[in-house]
Image (cartoon, rainbow, N blue to C red):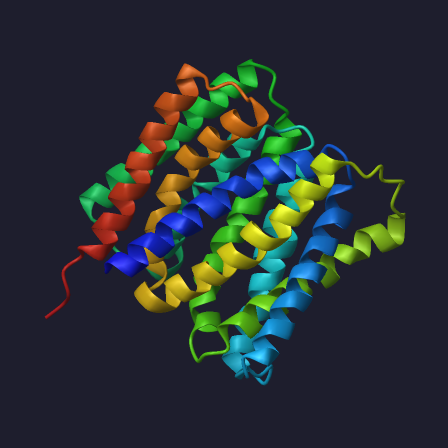
Amino acid sequence: MDFKAIMMGLAFAFMWSSAFSSARIIVAEAPPVASLSLRFLISGLIAVALARMMGQSWRLTRGQWRATLIFGLCQNALYLGLFFVAMQTVEASLAAIIASTMPLIVAAAGWAAYGERLAPPAVAGLVAGVVGVVLIMGARLSGGADLWGIGLCVIGVIALALATLSVRGASSGGNLLMIVGLQMLVGSAILAVPPLVMGVGPVALSWPLVAAFSYTVIVPGLAATFVWFVLVNRVGATRAATFHFLNPVFGVAIAAMVLGEPVRLTDGIGVLIVTAGILAVQLSRQARPKKA
């Protein structure tokens, strides 16, 4: 992995992790699903317009369309939609920790669904990841964390894993920025259904809400997603997913600095264990010897 890819991965991890804190601000003052749908609509239209200005086409291959639709559904509508709803009652730091388990789920899914052999370090990493999450969850639940919100986050991160397994098909063949915009519009359309059916209550605009919404549209929405697609296309999904090990660290740190959320001792220990587990899984998969 070259220096440029490493810097892209670090930038992606920071931008992605910061989204949990900005989302926490948004859902405290506005309907979560409607806000997310509007965010994707704005981000998607901007991305498509920029892509057209760059000469990119929306005439994608069948594989690209399929992967783009799956990505729009699984990541944008399910993963982020469920997390936005959950973060009305779940702290941003906890949401970031749950989301960071995605590489572990991808590795487990590869073993269960595709029969991928896991080296001993990878198995140890999966076990460590589970132990770390159980430690964090046990402490949070005993402290009164919302079980329903945690359940939504768990379902959401499983959907994120499915999106990650499909992203490689979307990132090959060019038109990356166009694909970013189109998968956001897919998510926006799906998320628009509940507000249209059930209605949206009044929203009191405030500077924190406007600032958090604008930041989420531009940085985690457009920039981070584009960097992720480019990174996966450059180094592959497995190596790119390695940078998710930074999400629990960045997510907890940003939530503490921006929102003033407390950093508990069990959180710190659990984050270190989960981080070590993710690294063990990813590095083991990268170092796997080739068959003769």
Of all residues, the one furthest to the left in this rendering is 292
Q: Residue at x 73, y 54 (%)?
A: 37
Of all residues, the one furthest to the front in this rendering is 207
Asked if residue 276 is positioned above or below residue 45 in the image, the reply reads above
Q: Which part of the image, by quadrant, shows the C terminus?
A: bottom left
Q: Residue at x 52, y 52 (%)?
A: 160
Q: Quadrant of residue 127?
A: top left
Q: Residue at x 18, y 57 (%)?
A: 288
The answer, for residue 66, to whether it is visible in the render is yes
The answer, for residue 108, to whether it is visible in the render is no
Residue 44 locus on image (x, y percent): 65, 65
Residue situated in front as seen by the camera: 238 or 110? 238
Please state if 272 lies on the left or on the right of 154 as rendered.
left
Asked if residue 261 is positioned above or below residue 104 in the image, the reply reads above
Residue 63 locus on image (x, y percent): 50, 78
Q: Residue at x 40, y 33 (%)?
A: 249
Residue 105 locus on image (x, y percent): 42, 47
Please state if 26 lies on the left or on the right of 156 as rendered.
right
Asked if residue 256 is positioned above or below residue 230 in the image, the reply reads above
Q: Quadrant of residue 20?
A: top right
